[in-house]
Image (cartoon, rainbow, N blue to C red):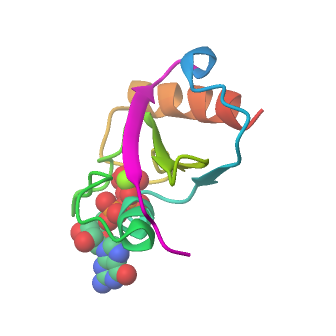
Amino acid sequence: MHIKSAEFVMSNTDVAKCPKDPIPEYAFIGRSNVGKSSLINMLTERKSLAKTSGRPGKTQLINHFRINNNWFLVDLPGYGYARVSKKDKKTFQKFITEYFQ
Ligand SMILES: Nc1nc2c(ncn2[C@@H]2O[C@H](COP(=O)(O)OP(=O)(O)OP(=O)(O)O)[C@@H](O)[C@H]2O)c(=O)[nH]1
Ligand SMILES: [Mg+2]
């Protein structure tokens, strides 16, 4: 598929505020630092659409990207060994669960 456009839409921790456009949405979930954000950049052929880091725990929000104006890619925080506080891990877990529900 040719990616003609890939635009950052918004970042959220509140699922109710996420985009409601009735278009397909593909999200990546996995352990922290496995390369979820890098995969989004690879797929869209954009170097820094999604923020990446060698330090686990870079992605801390629900990030929506609109692709070709007709579907979303979603970057989520990782689980497992993100270098963030226990409190932040709980927060991530809560909104990620709400997102998938
Ligand atoms: N060797 C190798 N390194 C990769 C690959 N993909 C990503 N990385 C590196 O792995 C590290 C983490 O990549 P991210 O894309 O930020 O990982 P993430 O899963 O989004 O991490 P969190 O946001 O913490 O959940 C970075 O240093 C990347 O450069 C890959 O295919 N091979
Ligand atoms: Mg990430």
Q: Is residue 54 toward the left or the right of residue 41 in the image?
A: left
Residue displayed at 40% across by 53% down: 6
Residue nearest the observer in this picture, 97 or 43: 43
Q: Is residue 69 above or below residue 4?
A: above
Span highlighted in magenta in the image: 1-14
Q: Quadrant of residue 99?
A: top right
Residue at (57, 34) in percent of width and height: 93
Q: Residue 54 or 63: which is nearer the viewer? A: 63
Query: Where residue 89 appears, x then y in whole percent?
Result: 46, 34
Query: Magenta includes 7?
Result: yes
Q: Position of residue 86 (x, y in %)?
A: 41, 31
Q: Position of residue 29 (x, y in %)?
A: 58, 55
| Up/down of 4 relative to 17, above or below | below
- What residue is rendered at 31% in x and 55% in y? 56
Write the residue at 66% across / 25% down. 20
Left or right placement of residue 67 versus residue 33 in this view:
right
Left or right: 59, with 43 as reference point: left
Ligand 1's image quarter is bottom left
Give the image quarter of residue 87.
top left
Outermost residue on the right side: it is 101
Q: Indicate the quadrant containing the C terminus: top left, top right, bottom left or bottom right.
A: top right
Picture coordinates of residue 83, whole percent (x, y): 30, 46
Q: Nearer the viewer, residue 101 or 49?
A: 49
Q: How many marks?
A: 0
Q: Nearer the viewer, residue 50 or 4?
A: 4
Answer above or below: position of 95 versus 69. above
